[in-house]
Amino acid sequence: MSREPFDPNAITVEGIFRAKLARRQRLAKLPFEQKIEIVKKLQQVPIAAMRNEKLIFASFLEAYPELANEIVEWDVVDEWYVKRALDPPPHPFDKRPDIIALTKSGKKIGIELKSWVNREQITEARTEERRRENILEAIGEQPPNKTKHIGYVWLFPKQIRFEPRDARHFREQLFALIEQMDNAWSQKPDYQPNSSDDDDVSDFVGFPLLEKYLEGVRFAPLPYFETDWIDFPSPGGAYSPNEMLETLTSSLSAHKTDERYRDLRKHVDLDEVYLLVHYDFKAFAYNTPFDAPNFGFEKAAEFASSVLDGDGGNFDRIFLFHFLWGQEEAYRIFPTVAEKR
Amino acid sequence: MEKVLETLNRMQADGVMEKFAIGGGIATIRYLEAYLTDDIDVFISPVIVGANGLVSFGRIYEYLRELGYPADREYIKIEDWLVQFVPASESVQEEAVARADRVAFAGVYTLMFSAEHLAAELLRSGRPKDHASVVSLLESEQMDLTVFRDIVSRHGLAEAWKKFCSQYDLEE
């Protein structure tokens, strides 16, 4: 059997997608016992993911010269203090953020790296699944969707435990919000009949239990579901770019408002804090593709920028980085629209 | 997972439940690539109704507690797996249990939803992620579409299937 020599510089997005499709088909044909073994391994993935921040950040700077030209020195956080014989701040700020850098203008910046999808996230997803189940249990049996404008509702829960005593009022407030959104839908300034534009709500004034448990709620006009129309974005196991984009949405939504970064500037004495979301080989190997015909990384960056909607949360800048051999692309997705470098 | 399957077989032999079949994520993984799931959905039929008229799991939970597997909310942890018992209250679920495939796993036999019944049940449950699985099952070419369409029509899912095909641009 002849095989063409492997050329890492000749990989195309289409080739990646074909390879992943072939991989999916091959994995689907494995014996059932072997598949369950894979499930068991996924369940046992350690929390600590392999750390390769140095490699990722160096590669990112090559792909994004605007920032590289600003930076005069940088290190991963552990080495930053050791190399400079500095006393690190008290724990846990001695380990945060992943990268510390100095700019030409004398600013000290911190960069937190976040894998778009990684093995740690898969493990965390198990806890998330429990949290979601508790919320669905609180909602209870869903009535048929009788709204005029809302096809389905997606909930983005906060990372806190759901108290069973809040169930009844949580349900009441959720359905009150849905009714309010449905009634106001056609009054929106940009309203167009049959539009598929979603509406994300994260301001829960008047709905204290939604505020307590949810980061946000997405109201989507399409597709229309009559039953089980209130749900969460799938945590995994599905096979469309939309699933990966929802994962990116969740990741950005959760990370940008993560309380751990709120006071980072003060505790680590930073002038600015950046977030670098990277799609790397681990994501490529372990997760479903974000790309599809006519939907590449640039589109993903535009999508990410729209998700942020001008709000970087605790971060001064947010970047999206495609860290795959010969396919490196980097975009600043906050504070501006997707901008390729 | 063998321990779970052995326990289920033992429960059936001891008359704790009459018929059962595994559906949900584990049944999906039988046909598609593996993904992370840590619970096993066991559909039971007929539905056991208690004196108060509600679905009763008391006998099942008591039996498993005596085997050393206490309930954890709606789950029961057997070895490393969270097992959830689901009453087959929908007609398609009931038929999925009655006509389940006999599947060998590491030398233990168990019962699982056929691909056609699994897809019909996922179509019925209708969550976006369930629909994604239906699309994948259709793409996997492991389903007999004639059988699937027959299930759909007999269990009042024709309208849902029509909408599904329209949404995902598929041929009915």
Image (cartoon, coloured by chain):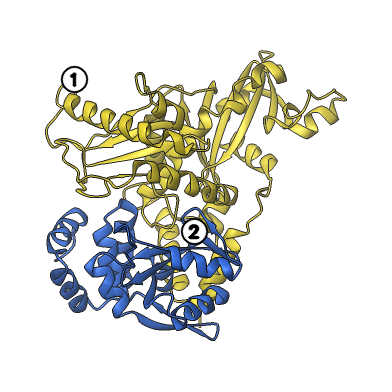
Chain colours: A yellow, B blue
Cα gap from disc 1 to disc 2, whole angstroms: 47 Å
Observer-nearest of A139 and A340 = A139
Residue A28, numbered circle: none
Identify the element where label 1 is drawn: loop
Residue A69 screen position, x and y as percent: 62, 24
Q: In this orientation, does residue B129 appear?
A: yes
Position of the C terminus of chain B, as image quadrant, is bottom left
Residue B94 screen position, x and y as percent: 27, 72
Q: Amino acid at mark 2?
A: Tyr
Classify 10 Å Cα crowding around label 2: few (below 14), some (14-19), many (20 and above). Answer: some
Residue B134 screen position, x and y as percent: 29, 63
Identify the element where label 2 is drawn: strand
Comparing labels 1 and 2, the label whose residue is closer to the camera? 2
Which residue ends up furthest to the bottom in the rendered image?
Answer: B107
In the rendered structure, the answer to whether residue A9 lies left or right of residue A336 reads right
Q: Amino acid at mark 1?
A: Pro
Residue B46 screen position, x and y as percent: 31, 72
In percent of the image, x 54 and y 65: which residue is there? A39
Q: Note whether B143 is above or below A15 in the view shown.
A: below
Residue A189, numbered circle: 1
Per the image, the residue denoted by label 2 is B75
Q: Chain of mark 1?
A: A
